[in-house]
Image: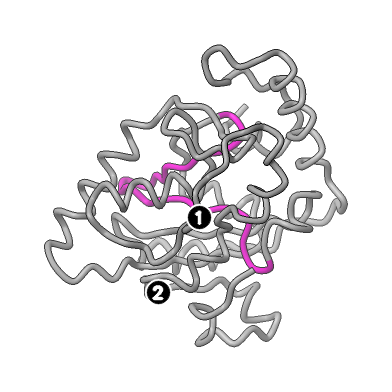
Amino acid sequence: MTKIFRLHNYHRINNFPKRSPFIKRVLSQLVFIILVTKITLRKNYLEEDDYVVAKKLIQKGDLVLAGGFRAISGLFMGKFFTHSLLYIGGGDCIHADADGVDTISFKELFTVYDTLTILRPQIKENYEETIEKAIYFSQKQIGKPYDFYLEHRKDRYVCTQLINASFENAGFDTGVGIKDEIRQNFLWIFWRIRKVVRADDFLKGNFQTVFVSKSLKEKNQDIKKLNKLGA
């Protein structure tokens, strides 16, 4: 069973922060089950042609945004995209999902998601060095658990937080992030849900769009405005 197959199907989450309370583990599992519940049995919209073109364009350090809208999570996680990944070269991306931080094949994304775009960070100086630092940092986070309660701690991540942390560590400002102080108390979870950075928010950041899947074009989205649109 591949990682992406597990990600989009029911299974037991085993990767939790150390000393995580039992009740939090149970609630996290319930949240995961709800989010991956399918609301339609249709095939995903990305096509083989999308992959062929995207493969030729993508470069190390590119940000990949993908949208999956066949499950409940797609109803509120974003208008265009629901997930963010960092392309690290060799046909692989690194990301944070319900099972924690791990790598995933770029090609596999085209078998599950409905929309996809590639964004290139607008780094003005020391481009290659900055990219290598961002990738190195992200790889050092492999194995860390998912931040189900959006607490923004360094020992757990959601996908957008991993992207921001990787580029920030490399000295690049994505232009997207939480400006307010994070309120750690568990009871502030609903406040943090409103404040969390979503994949769509990167469209307003310091990136250039280099690829957009056919599924977005066929929905008559104005591609030139993508970088100005949020959730």
Quarter placement of the N terminus: top right
How packed mark 1 is, by other alpha carbons closer than 10 Å (few <14, some 14-19, many 20 or more), is few
Which colouring convention does the figure follow? one colour
| Labels 1 and 2: the sequence-earlier one | 1
Q: Give whichever of 217, 135 is nearer the camera.
A: 135
Which of the 4 image quarters holds residue 19?
A: top right
Image position of 1 with respect to 121: above or below: above
Percent from the top left, x then y, of residue 81? 61, 62
* Residue of label 2: 210
Q: Give the range drawn in magenta.
A: 79-99
The residue drawn where x is 44% and y is 25% is: 143
* Residue of label 1: 180
Percent from the top left, x then y, of residue 68? 68, 55
Percent from the top left, x then y, of residue 27? 76, 26
Secondary structure of the residue carrying numbered label 1: loop
Tell whether position 89 is magenta: yes
The residue drawn where x is 59% and y is 40% is: 150
Secondary structure of the residue carrying numbered label 2: strand
Mark 1–mark 2 distance (CA, rounded to whole Å): 31 Å
